[in-house]
């Protein structure tokens, strides 16, 4: 999906004690105008943080939101789509945690070996049984 951010507006407010989230110091509303396939839409994102205004000004909060999507795209999306983790049938005992750790390790090893496309890397490594062993030993 191709995205172009045309405009970014952030409204930040301090929070008084006694809110539903005990440690909340700031709430921010982030509005961004996005163009997708030639059509402009407005996305609204809310940020709740325990960081006060001295620790997190609006620019810092915006960077945190952008950083969140970097993690989402580089790790969670790969786990959800490439590994199809949501349809996993392993649900007994510690098996889900072990499988998640194995998937994270595979992603980390492949990224460390300069693979930008995990799907392409997995296809590459399935064609020769020596490749995964070599990759693990050289990571």
Image (cartoon, rainbow, N blue to C red):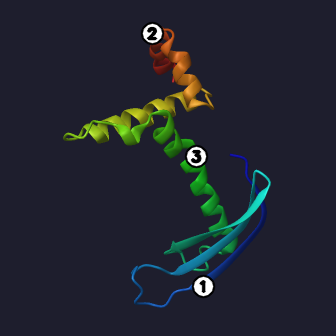
Residue beneath label 3, please?
73
Q: Is residue 7 above or below residue 76?
A: below
Q: Earlier in the sequence, mark 2 or mark 3?
A: 3
Percent x, y of residue 38: 80, 54
- Outermost residue toward the left? 93
Q: Earlier in the sequence, mark 1 or mark 3?
A: 1
Q: Are marks 1 and 2 in contact (CB under 8 Å)?
A: no
Measure how far apart labels 1 and 2 are at the Cα level. 56 Å
Q: Are marks 2 and 3 in contact (CB under 8 Å)?
A: no
Circle 2 residues within 10 Å: few <14, some 14–19, many ≥20: few
Number of labels in the image equals 3
Q: Residue at x 61, y 62 (%)?
A: 65
Residue beneath label 1, please?
13
Circle 3 residues within 10 Å: few <14, some 14–19, many ≥20: few
Measure how far apart labels 1 and 3 are at the Cα level. 29 Å
Q: Are marks 1 and 3 in contact (CB under 8 Å)?
A: no
Q: Nearer the viewer, residue 85 or 22?
A: 85
Q: Secondary structure at mark 1?
A: strand
Residue 5's image quarter? bottom right
Q: Residue at x 30, y 36 (%)?
A: 98
Circle 1 residues within 10 Å: few <14, some 14–19, many ≥20: few
Q: Earlier in the sequence, mark 1 or mark 2?
A: 1
Residue 7 shown left or right of residue 97 in the figure: right
Residue beneath label 2, please?
129
Percent x, y of residue 127: 51, 10
Q: Residue at x 67, y 80 (%)?
A: 11
Q: Residue at x 46, y 18 (%)?
A: 137
Mark toward the viewer: 1 or 3:
3
Q: Is residue 48 above or below residue 74?
A: below
Q: Secondary structure at mark 2?
A: loop
Q: Secondary structure at mark 3?
A: helix
Percent x, y of residue 56: 61, 73
């Amino acid at each position: 999906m191709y995205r172009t951010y045309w405009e970014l507006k952030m409204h930040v407010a301090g929070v008084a004690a006694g809110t539903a989230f005990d440690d909340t110091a700031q709430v921010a509303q982030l509005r961004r105008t996005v163009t997708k396939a030639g059509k402009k839409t407005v996305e609204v994102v809310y940020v709740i943080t325990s960081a006060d205004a001295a620790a997190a000004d609006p620019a810092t909060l915006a960077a945190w939101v952008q950083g969140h999507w970097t993690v989402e795209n580089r790790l969670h999306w790969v786990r959800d789509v490439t590994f199809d983790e949501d349809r996993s049938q392993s649900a007994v005992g510690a098996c889900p945690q072990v499988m998640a750790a194995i998937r994270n390790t595979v992603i980390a090893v492949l990224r460390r070996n300069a693979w930008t496309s995990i799907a392409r890397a997995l296809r590459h490594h399935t064609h020769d049984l020596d490749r995964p062993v070599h990759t693990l030993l050289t990571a």
